Image (spheres, coloured by chain):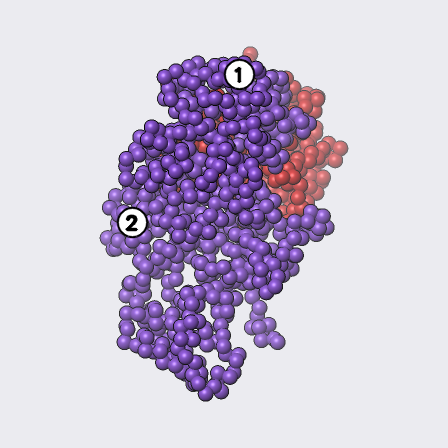
Amino acid sequence: MGAGKHFNQVWRSLSKDSNRRILLIIGLGFDPRCLKGLEGMIRAGAIPNGCRAVEYGSGRPDRNEGLIALAESNKQRLEAILPQDKVQKVQVRTLSDDGRNVGGRRIVEAFNSPQDYVGYTDVVVDISALPPGLYFPLIGTLLQLAARSFHNLHVIVSDNPALDSSIVAEGGDRAEMIVGFESGTERAATADPLHVWAPVLGEEAHSQLRAISSHRDWTLIHPVLPFPSKNPRRGDELVTSYYDLLFDEWQIEPEDFIYANEQNPFDVYRALVSLSVSVRSSLDSIGTPQVYVSSHSSKLMSLGALLAAFEEKLGVVHVQPSSYFIDSSNREDSDGELYEVWLAGEPYATP
Amino acid sequence: MQRNPFRVQTSEHASNQEEFLSLFGSEVLEILPKDGLWNRLLILEAAPGAGKSTILRLFTPEVLKEVHRNRARPENLGLIDRLENFDAVSTRGPLVLGTLVSCRGQYAAIDDLELSHAEKRRWFFGLLDARVTLLTLRSVCTFAGLQYPNDLDKLTIPSLGSSTDTARSSLNGFELYQKAAAREDSLATAIDSLTSHEVCEDSFRTQLSALRIFSGPQFEMSGVYLPEICLTMFDDVQDLTPWQQAELVKDLQNRDIRTARWMARRLDVLSIDELLQSGGTDGRDYQCRRMEDWARGNRAKFRRLLETIADRRIRKTDLGVNNFASLLDSDLTTQSEINGATAASEKTREDVLAAHGDEFAYSSWIKVTEADYKDKPDAHLESAKHWRALDIITNRRRPKREARLSHEPRPPDDLYHQKTSDVLTAAELLVALDHRLPFYYSFPRISGLASSNIEQFLRIGGAIFDKLLLLQVTGRRSNISATEQDQIARRLARAAIEALPRDVPFGSEVQRLVQSIGTYSREVTTREAASYSPGVIGVGLRQSQFELLLDDEEIQHRAELGRLRDVLRSSIAHNVLEARGPKKVKGHSWMVFYLNRLLSPAFRLPVVSSQFQEIAMSDMLTWLTYGYRPPSRQERLLP
């Protein structure tokens, strides 16, 4: 994993290999971070050979003029950075005509053809401007394709927890499993299922957490708190913010909390894998433990959750909002730190 | 550490059956129809948190067995009585084998796959049928106290229904399980797959075969009594797509199914005109009950239900209290409240005398009011209310200037006749506003803020309990004063409005609409003559204008109508607005949208009222974009 100056080192090193052909996948919308990864790669000398820009939307007329303007500005910036013959725009509709969340299935359909990766050695997904409902199934699909297709899969993200907090999800109240991450958790054939849920906590997620809390009869709940974190009190603040939910409704005990480094997705991954292994071994004798994860925190932490879910076959439950807006009263500077995580390929090859 | 008993998971999600029953208010069962419960499709509809899933859970084997085990306990007598009336339990035990089938999950995702409609239909029924089979078999094991699925080989399902997949004289339970499990696995894996969708051909169905199978003679399990009534309950039906719902409802009405079948769905999937139909509509083969309609039509019963729920929760604490309502002051009792009410009484009296003292027509009214409340220092609030009521009634008559010219004072009976409870409530509200007195207090008003929703009541109860705990811990008092209740109500209302953008689809616009309706309602309510006693809490659109929102063609031409439809639909489905109508007023039909009562305190509106103000569609569209702007002083003065 490369962060900050290490991000530059990673891409500088990769760019020296003239045989490398890089396909970059980005989300092209209102998020001010959507082109940070591309700009960072170019600065390091790693110019993508191709770019697929995901333009996602509900299919209904957008009502927020501020966000429309931001999205338009990002499109123009992309045209200025990369020649247009290198860029393919991919439209992904996130809502069906009857108002259901279909973005996950649509993005899988748009990216699951091995033919699209012929000629590329590295696929890079910049999740900075993509919502979890899209990048979870996208990365899940690419992880399955990597071994038999392009081989190297990277994820980059411009991480800015403060900006994540100011992007407010509107109107999400229905919990559902993310496409590709049902992981056998919904089976009526299962004898004595024991549902264990690990929410990766972040700010302003009360209604989402309540929706997921109602989704199942949870046997155990293990909230994941970011620690260490840039703001050393962030974990305390989250506990305070969710006090009623944690202690009155869920009856959490102090030993139920799990801690994972806010800035290291592999720490989140290790924590969740460890939980999964521990739960399965200790509860196996009294039922069939099924572990679920949900991510309400930064993109970086959610990446760790995704990896754990993919490897350990955890269920990923998610609340898809109807739209987003930026809470400008809470908005901070949009420059975050760039991270690169190499998920599949050369570093993992057995000698 | 004392947990807040109102925030313990709602009874729907209680961790064990004993806890579930301890929290369950049996009055809610009154919504179930007396007849046809076991042989017609029953549809329960409500906003989130109204208690649909809780009712369904009651009829699962684990809960009914627990009820039967504890039938002698005093707190369960009412429940036992009601269940016996439904023939759901007897002295021998449960008479119903209930199976709960959630419609959440993968069914809707079938619609997103690249399949023809016919294929999607077969996948849908295939997966649902497999799960109905498996969950029913699980219910049998639970009822019989056996292990699922290993003990299913002890189960025999005798001769099959008329339309089946395989013709056999009987089926072994474990074989049925294995086949259904294989079908479920094949379909579920394919639906979730990121790359391919291969499914065993055997997995598909065109109807719920399981219910036909279970419509035959009673199951047999060696040495075990199994109930005769097999009940399948489909929960969260709103999570199916519209065509899946329609197909399910159609199949469940089929007469070759002789098992009992119920379904529960949230309001948010209905088209807007369906939302506004009465919840009591019944067809030949189904019965429909809308829970909010029941609560509104049975206010006293619903309040008793809330009392039961609150009392059961408060008894779980260490406070040694059995009755929640007794913890809430129903009068002004603190010194500061009494002082405020006394000052309000004096000031109101002075103002009324200043305004009407020289009007001969009202002299006897003034005289009786003086007599009724003079030398009654403890009746401070009552005094203020009645003086204000006098002012309201007099102002209504003011335009008729003959009052000054009259030679005869109006008789006191005339005043008493016009001083209805609505007028007195309006008077109390205006006194509270003018003199900063509490208004939202006492159990009837606090429970009224629940707006026919149990989960909402628990939220209010939770906030009240927090305050109570604080007071007890600091050793101050064991009751919550009127002022404290009022503050809690207003804080909850403001918080609910602030949370709308996050909690509800199209939340920012819903918030703007709610704020507009609330502000406008308050303006109308506080007009001098209080013409709409006890106060306006909603707005009405003329039926002809409302019907534009149901016209897809019209909406295609006017995008703003589509916006308004989305916002209204979301507001109604999430219990932010209550829709009623059509109501006939002034010779026209109106569709009325009332604020959820929880929001009333944010705008200082009454809790119980049926008053609304008519507005034009153009007004509502303007509010949606810009919010309601009260007219300026100059505008008010313009003719």
Amino acid type assigned to the residue bearing label 1 in the image: Lys
The residue at 44%/71% (across/down) is B418
The crowd level at tag 1 (other Cα within 10 Å; few <14, some 14-19, many 20+) is: some
Where residue B589 sits in the image (x, y, percent)? 61, 59
> What's under tag 2, amino acid-wise?
Asn
- Does A343 sit above or below residue A71? above
- Residue A293 image offset from top left, x and y in percent: 47, 30
User: In the depicted view, which residue is nearer to us: A153 or B230?
Assistant: B230
Q: Which lettered chain is shown in purple? A: B
Q: Can residue A193 be seen by looking at this rendering?
A: no
Q: Secondary structure at mark 2?
A: loop
Depth check, front residue: B306 or B555:
B306
- At 65% from the left and 53% from the top, the residue drawn is B547
| Residue A98 visible within the image | yes
Write down the colour of chain A.
red
Query: In the picture provided, is B398 more to the left or to the right than B486?
Result: right
Q: Secondary structure at mark 1?
A: helix
Residue for badge 1: B179
Place of residue A4 in the rendered image (x, y in percent of width and height, measured from the top left): 54, 34
Label 2 sits on residue: B323
Q: Are marks 2 and 1 on the same chain?
A: yes
